[in-house]
Amino acid sequence: MTEYDVNTDTYLNAKDLSQDEGRAIFGTHTLLKTIGDPSGKTVIDMCCGDGRLGWLLLNMGAKSVTGVDVSAEMLAHAELKRKALPPEEQQRVRFHQADLSNTDLILPPSDLICGLYVLHYADSREAISGMGRFIARNLKEDGLCAVVTLNPDVDPNADNAEAQAEEGYSIDFTDGPESTLHIGDFSCTIWRWSRAVLERELSNAGLCDFKWEPMEAPADRPDLFARYSEWRKNPQCVVFSARKASDC
């Protein structure tokens, strides 16, 4: 059982979780820019939670979305939303419960594997490799994986008080990889791995062509650049992308 099972409502009600407002726009915009037009494509949504990324991609024309998450409670919320769709739309969405760091789950190979906030839930190097094996096993030969995740180059020693006030969430870093994420009244453990560790383990798992994209805001939202000026000096998230080694 995860923190998301124990404190599901606290997490869902936490401030600034909307994908249409504030800081979250940076991650969603940069992720969508990285993956391009999802129209007609099959998608796997890693760490899907209540499915908020999946619904967005479906509305943009994705052929189907398969969400995978370890939290039964979060998936229950996602399933309620699925059942509220028209019957023909329900067929385009499905969910699976699995620990992405340690699963043999095999799905139909997908064009895209995406996720909002993913790799920092790996609690060991083997867990990173496990996530990589899941991606390599379920991605089409010419497919793309792109996820929002913790920035491996974030400076944990920087004074982030003002930036965290802008963000609406905070991270308590330690000397090791284990850290604590706070979103409103919700808290959970995350892990800060170096770029070298992440790329080594994911390469061993069968991925390549790694890219780390800095967060961007839409050109029509200049207000966000000023509003999150401190956060942008030491951004805590990036968009990571990769392809299967056989495609590189």
Image (cartoon, rainbow, N blue to C red):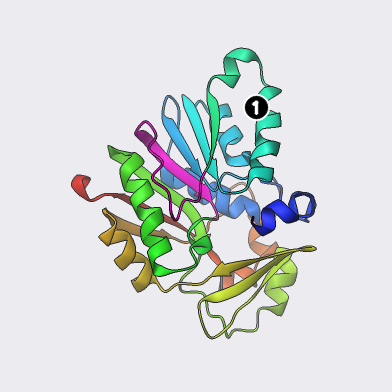
Residue at horizontal 38 percent and vertical 48 percent from the top: 134
Give the SS element for disc 1.
helix
Up-down relation of residue 177 to residue 151 (above or below): below
Task: Note whether residue 193 is visible.
Answer: yes
Give the overall secondary structure of the magenta segment. loop
Residue 226, percent across and down?
A: 67, 64
Residue at horizontal 64 percent and vertical 53 percent from the top: 24
Question: Magenta span covers which residues?
Answer: 98-117
Residue 76, percent across and down?
A: 68, 37
Q: Which amino acid does label 1 sit on?
A: Arg
104 drawn magenta: yes
Using the image as rendered, state which of residue 109 and residue 3 is in the foreground: 3
Q: Quadrant of the N terminus?
A: bottom right
Task: Note whether residue 223 is visible.
Answer: no
User: On the image, numbered disc 1 is attached to which residue?
Assistant: 82
Residue at horizontal 71 percent and vertical 30 percent from the top: 80
Residue at horizontal 54 percent and vertical 86 percent from the top: 175
